[in-house]
Image: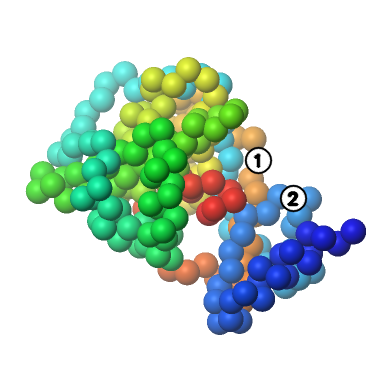
Amino acid sequence: MGLGKIVTQMCIDTVSKDTTIMLIATEQGKPLYEKMGFSAVDCVQKYLCDRYIPIQSNDKMEMEIHTFSPKDLAQIVTLDERAVGAKRKKFLINRIEQAKECLTVKDRDGTVIGYGLSILGPVNLILGPIVAPNFEIACLLVDKLARNHQGRVRIDVPSGHEEFMLFLEQHDFYKVSQPPVMIINSKQLPPRNGTLYGIAAQVFG
């Protein structure tokens, strides 16, 4: 009936043509978005795990992992903006409230250098966003968020993190799809610093 196209166009029309719009499409939806002017610029890797295998030796290096405190919010927003390329304060506040767990990683000086959320859905425990300064810390965040969950776990990983994806596969995750990241009003995604290891969800980016 064309209702999807109408609704999508109405969303596009709510912002100026100078605003980059991003979405993560399904393979079935990709042709529709291409007809509307979107182009594929990247992809994410959807991983599922039926039973997570915890890390045996947990070397925390020179940092500590803590449960979220409201005083950490400003630093999390800043880290997230650099990782994603957009300021998402309102979204993060709402997502943290929904979270089963929100963890922060702090260095010796108490500065927040990474964070991770888990959201308990009806089918999966969803991990993300996961923002970390390096692969090792991203792995520790996944381990802390997933190790005590009895059931299926999901994480969607941006491209460019092959070592991290290998870790996931070694701990019983398996890749189920590779949906395209599509944009309009620009030829490329906003600048990102490579610290985004897990997106919030395909619907939120």
| Residue lying farthest to the left in this orientation | 109
Q: In this view, does 71 lie to the left or right of 142?
A: left
Element class at badge 2: loop
Query: x, y (%) of residue 13?
Result: 66, 76
Query: x, y (%) of residue 22?
Result: 58, 64
192 shown above or below 110 = below
The answer to whether the residues at label 1 and label 2 have Cβ atoms under 8 Å apart is yes
Query: x, y (%) of residue 172?
Result: 51, 23
Residue 177 is marked as: 1
Tag 2: amino acid: Glu
Element class at badge 1: strand
Label 1, residues with CA under 10 Å away: few <14, some 14-19, many ≥20: some
Q: In this view, does 90 lie to the left or right of 37?
A: left
Tag 1: amino acid: Ser
Q: In which quarter of the image is residue 128?
A: top left
Q: In this view, does 205 lie to the left or right of 117?
A: right
User: Residue at point 50% right, 36% down?
Assistant: 126
- The residue singled out by tag 2 in the image is 27
N-terminal label among 1 and 2: 2
Visible residue check, residue 62: yes
What is the C-alpha distance between the residues marked 1 and 2? 9 Å
Q: In which quarter of the image is residue 186?
A: bottom right
User: Residue at point 25% right, 48% down?
Assistant: 70
84 shown above or below 49 = below
Render colour scheme:
rainbow
